[in-house]
Image (cartoon, grey):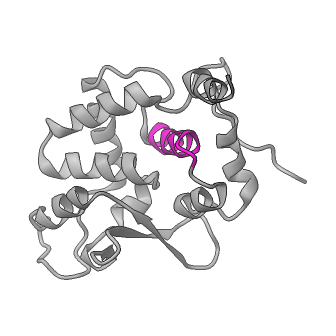
Amino acid sequence: METAPFSLYDASGARKYLNAAERAAFLDAAQKMEPRICAFCEVLALTGCRVSEALELCRERVDLAQASLIFRTLKRRAEHFRSVPVPRQLIDRLLALPPGVGQGRTPRARFFPECRQTYWEYVKLVMDAAGIKGPQACPKGLRHGFGMRAVERGVPEGLLQRWLGHARRETTDVYLQAVGPEERAFAERTW
């Protein structure tokens, strides 16, 4: 039995992704937080990774030569890694983080050593500080916002699929359902 693809709207029709203005407000609010929270929020917003994937990041998963972060895709049965390019400033921010409690500066010491729930709450804290309310005000909203932004900026679908760690092209296709200001931007290109 085939499962229906997920939607960018909830049951009441509310948007589940951050738009460009919300993303900017989120990143601005994150800049005002302590360095580890700021870095975590930037990783989510600038890579579209899942919370659990960000939590595994360590020095060993920073590719300095390519200015990218290497994520272990957690939704596949076989172990799979993917590289996502990031701004050099984010890499510098990550490498400057002090070790977590009980961790040294080893290559496998995680940048974000606390539990998943703690970081989920940090994201909500930053969303609140940015004034973002609704179903998009969560880590998944950042992931969906990354996907929408990539489509809006003309990132090829195959590349976006790889960056997001989707096993199936159909999962990535949902971001082609551009809506609101994103849909208008596409329409304006045709006028």
Q: Is residue 131 above or below residue 8?
A: above
State whether the magenta stretch is mostly helix, strand or loop. Answer: helix
Q: Determine whether, in the image, residue 42 is placed left or right of residue 37.
A: right
Q: Nearer the viewer, residue 3 or 170?
A: 170
Residue in the picture at 27% in, 75% down? 64
Q: Say which quarter of the image contains residue 94.
A: bottom left
For the point 14% across and 74% down, which residue is it? 103
Residue 164 located within the stretch drawn in magenta:
no
Q: Position of residue 187 (x, y in %)?
A: 66, 25
Q: Position of residue 47 (x, y in %)?
A: 42, 54
Left/right placement of residue 2 relative to residue 137 reads right
Between 58 and 121, the residue placed more toward the observer is: 58
Q: Is residue 115 above or below residue 149?
A: below
Q: Is residue 19 above or below residue 40?
A: above
* Percent coordinates x, y for residue 144 in the rendering: 53, 41
Give the residue furthest to the right.
1
Quadrant where the image shows the C terminus: top right
Q: How many marks?
A: 0
Task: Check the picture and name the quadrant holding the N terminus.
Answer: bottom right
Percent from the top left, x then y, of residue 165?
57, 63
Write down the region rendered in magenta: 140-154
Give the left or right position of residue 108, taking residue 54 as reference.
Answer: left
Q: Is residue 150 magenta?
A: yes
The residue at the point 31 percent across, 69 percent down is: 67
Residue 45 versus residue 92 in the image, above or below: above
